[in-house]
Image (cartoon, rainbow, N blue to C red):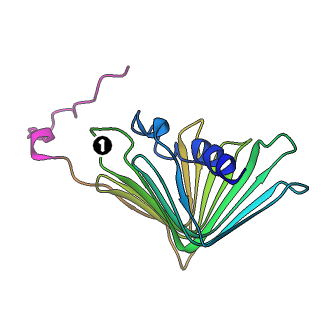
């Protein structure tokens, strides 16, 4: 029963980086934790202590993982906590590893929303978001980062490569990329 809940949770939560390597979902899910409990009446599975989850290029470490299911065993929510909890996955063969970390990562299955809370970081290929909270809508591909006066949202984008830069004369209009 524990394996089923973690596997469903992983399949739902970690399109965080759009699509993973095609072979990731075909790989076995390996879960290690110091302890695990499941309450059939409440539908809550709790994994604690040195949680390490691997499936293909996906790797997750956390201190605690709580998965809530309905009476049919469908995952409703998943909450991973750590100091911080770490997630990494290679989205496809031509992209670098995407990684995220936060004190708490919550997945709302019905809404398709992933929330990174507490010193949240999301990075890939030199680009990164840093904020106290980052929300990601899996269906829409939208990211919202929230900050405050003490912890402002920080974005870092790498410069274009030399091959992609063009030297324009002053006054020439910028080249735009064709729209699909």
Q: Position of residue 63 (x, y in %)?
A: 59, 73
Observer-nearest of 177 and 24: 24
Mark 1 nearby-residue class (10 Å; few <14, some 14–19, many ≥20): few
Q: Position of residue 99 (x, y in %)?
A: 41, 57
Residue at the bottom extreme of this rendering = 150
Residue extent of the magenta highlight? 161-180
Taking 87 as reference, is 151 above or below it?
Answer: below
The image quarter containing residue 146 is bottom right
Taking 10 as reference, is 34 above or below it?
Answer: below
Q: Does the stretch in magenta take in 166?
A: yes
Q: Quadrant of the C terminus?
A: top left
Looking at the image, which residue is at 50% across and 44% down? Answer: 28
Observer-nearest of 57 and 77: 57
Question: Could you say whether the residue bearing mark 1 is in a helix, strand or loop?
Answer: loop
The image quarter containing residue 49 is bottom right
Residue 153 lies left or right of residue 110; in this view the side is left
Residue 158 lies left or right of residue 50; in this view the side is left
Q: Does the stretch in magenta take in 37?
A: no
Number of residue marks? 1
| Mark 1 lies on residue | 95
Residue 98 lies left or right of residue 87; in this view the side is left
Q: Position of residue 45 (x, y in %)?
A: 75, 59
Q: Position of residue 53 (x, y in %)?
A: 51, 58
Taking 36 as reference, is 21 above or below it?
Answer: above
- The rendered magenta stretch, by its main secondary structure, is classed as loop
């Amino acid at each position: 029963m524990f394996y089923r809940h973690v596997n469903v949770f992983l399949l739902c939560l970690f399109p965080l980086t759009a699509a993973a390597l095609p072979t990731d979902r075909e790989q076995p899910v390996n879960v290690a934790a110091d302890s695990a409990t499941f309450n059939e009446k409440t539908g809550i599975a709790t994994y604690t202590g040195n949680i390490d989850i691997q499936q293909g290029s996906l790797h997750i470490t956390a201190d605690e993982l709580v998965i809530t299911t309905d009476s049919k065993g469908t995952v409703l929510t998943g909450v991973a906590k750590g100091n911080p909890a770490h997630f990494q996955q290679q989205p496809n063969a031509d992209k670098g590893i995407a990684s995220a970390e936060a004190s708490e990562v919550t997945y709302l299955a019905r809404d398709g929303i992933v929330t990174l809370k507490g010193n949240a970081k999301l990075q890939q290929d030199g680009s990164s978001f840093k904020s106290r909270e980052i929300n990601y809508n899996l269906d829409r591909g939208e990211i919202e980062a929230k900050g405050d006066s003490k912890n402002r949202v920080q974005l870092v984008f790498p410069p274009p490569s030399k091959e992609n830069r063009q030297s324009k004369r002053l006054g020439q209009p910028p080249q735009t990329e064709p729209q699909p």
